Image (cartoon, helix red, strand yellow):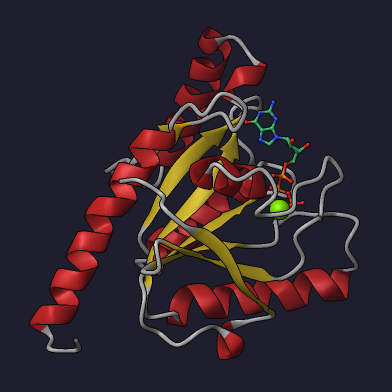
Amino acid sequence: MEVKSAVFKMSVPGLKECPKAIFPEYAFIGRSNVGKSSLINMLCKKKELARTSSTPGKTVSMNYFMINDNWYLVDLPGYGFAKRSKEKRHEWSSALSNYLQKREPLACVFVLVDSRVPPQMNDISFINFLGQNQIPFCVVFTKLDKLKSAEADANIEAFCAELALDWEQMPQMFKTSALDQTGRKEILNFIGKINDEFWKARKNAKII
Ligand code: GTP
Ligand code: MG
């Protein structure tokens, strides 16, 4: 799939304020600073579409980007950001689980995981939460350009071993780098296929 247009649509605090449930949407989530906003920019080939920063906690609300006038990318605030107040963290975590559990056109959640580090418990528990709630997701390993491929593979293997303790089937996984565009084509093709299924299901249900 090609990205022909990508525009910022709106910034919302939670489910209630999300746009009308018409288009399929893909949410990007992961620990603060893992590279969510950078990956969105890489997919859209637009350097400053989503704001990025080397300081964690840059994205503070849910940002909707309309792609090709018929689907959304949603940039979410990171989890596990220690510097945010306990109250704010709690607020966001309940807004997030409400959104993930109730947002009808949420076609897939992209869980971003830093390929430079061994498995982190907050990533694993987040994935377990998605699995337990039957929320469709895939895993995206980020920052592959920052380490040797054997090192990344060892971390990825350890991550899969950790997941295998709870799950029989492995989710779809992507290796990416926002710097050199590794994984771009694969992710866009994956989204393209889900979009086709989304519209087919809508048509069968006579919603459109
Ligand atoms: P928050 O919004 O704060 O949760 O962070 P985020 O997950 O959106 O991360 P962001 O995209 O802002 O990136 C964080 C930092 O990592 C920035 O300095 C990026 O330039 C850098 N970064 C992100 N992805 C990559 C990558 O693939 N390769 C390299 N080398 N740097 C990256
Ligand atoms: Mg961000």
Q: Is residue 113 above or below residue 27?
A: above
Q: Quadrant of ligand 1?
A: top right
Residue 96 position in % (x across, y down):
61, 72
Kindly tell me whether residue 171 is visible in this rendering: no
Between 81 and 18, the residue placed more toward the observer is 18
**As drawn, is 118 to the left or to the right of 70?**
right
**As drawn, is 121 to the left or to the right of 81?**
left
| Residue 147, quarter of picture | top right
Q: Give the residue at the far left of this rendering.
A: 204
Between 202 and 154, the residue placed more toward the observer is 202
Q: Is residue 192 above or below residue 179?
A: below
| Residue 185, quarter of picture | top left
Residue at x-position 49% and y-position 72%: 100
Residue 170 position in % (x across, y down):
32, 40
| Residue 142, quarter of picture | top right
Kindly tell me whether residue 127 is visible in this rendering: yes
Q: Quadrant of the C terminus?
A: bottom left
Residue at x-position 59% and y-position 9%: 148
Between 42 and 86, the residue placed more toward the observer is 42
**As drawn, is 49 to the left or to the right of 128?**
right
Residue at x-position 13% and y-position 70%: 200
Residue 11 position in % (x across, y down):
67, 75
Residue 195 position in % (x across, y down):
27, 61
Between 61 and 171, the residue placed more toward the observer is 61
Residue at x-position 56% and y-position 23%: 180
Give the number of callouts. Answer: 0
Q: Is residue 66 above or below residue 182?
A: below
